[in-house]
Image: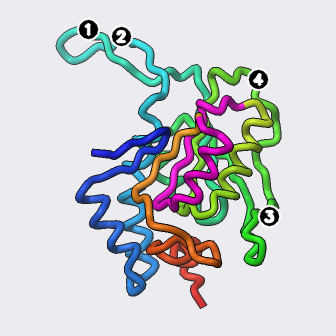
Amino acid sequence: MKTQQLNISVLKHPVIEDNLAIIRDKNTDSERFKNAVRKISYSLILEASKNLPMVEKTVETPLVTTKCRVIDKSIQVIIAPILRAGLIFSEAASELLPFSNIHHVGMYRNEETLEPVWYYDKKKNIIDNKDKVFVIILDPMLATGNSAVDTIENFIKKGAKEENITFVSLIAAPNGVSNIQENYSKVKIVTASLDDSINEKGYILPGLGDAGDRIFNTIE
């Protein structure tokens, strides 16, 4: 089940909520944290890809010939994890969409201004057939939304259609959701939780702390 308003889908399921409790707990170690995130990530990727174009295909079963619907392989699906935390979603995305292309996006947040600082952009070439390209951006945290908006803008400048872009996060703050919707209202947002707010340092509340540090066990 999910709740939906405007262009945001907040997934609601006992398994998702149970694993959200695990990743929010400050006493959860890195291994259990990553395992819980992976369990949630499959549901998020399935939701993010549910509107991919389908075509009909003839299949021979052991008994008869039948018609099946399959994902149109003439499309291009770009999976764009924002480094480094977005990598946690890549395994599920690659498993569910094995024909997709992975394009890493490298940026970090300036802790004083809370603005994103770019250091790597894998997707260099311009998108030709924009109607056939679908972009799924991956980042566990949608806090201020500045990194999300920058990444979306980057893909649109390269030729992606706004309505063919989906942003996937574990948890989101109203600030980040508003930032995306005010700038790119056609972009779809998929998340497992819409939290209360962000603090003065840009961390989501109640949140789960720094996702990258907890995934890669770099908490000091």
Label ID, residue 128 = 4
> What residue is rendered at 58% in x and 64% in y?
143
Going by the numbered disc 3, the residue's amino acid type is Val
Residue at label 3? 117
Q: Nearer the viewer, mark 2 or mark 3?
A: 3
Image position, residue 198 (x, y; %):
55, 71
> What residue is rendered at 75% in x and 63% in y?
116
Which SS class for mark 2? strand
Mark toward the start of the polypeptide (4 vs 2)? 2
Tell me if 31 is positioned left or right of 125 in this view: left
- Front-most of 148 and 74? 148
Label ID, residue 65 = 1
Bounds of the magenta span? 160-185
Residue 35 sits above or below residue 72 on the image: below
Q: Residue furthest left?
A: 63
Which SS class for mark 4? loop
Q: Quadrant of residue 199?
A: bottom right
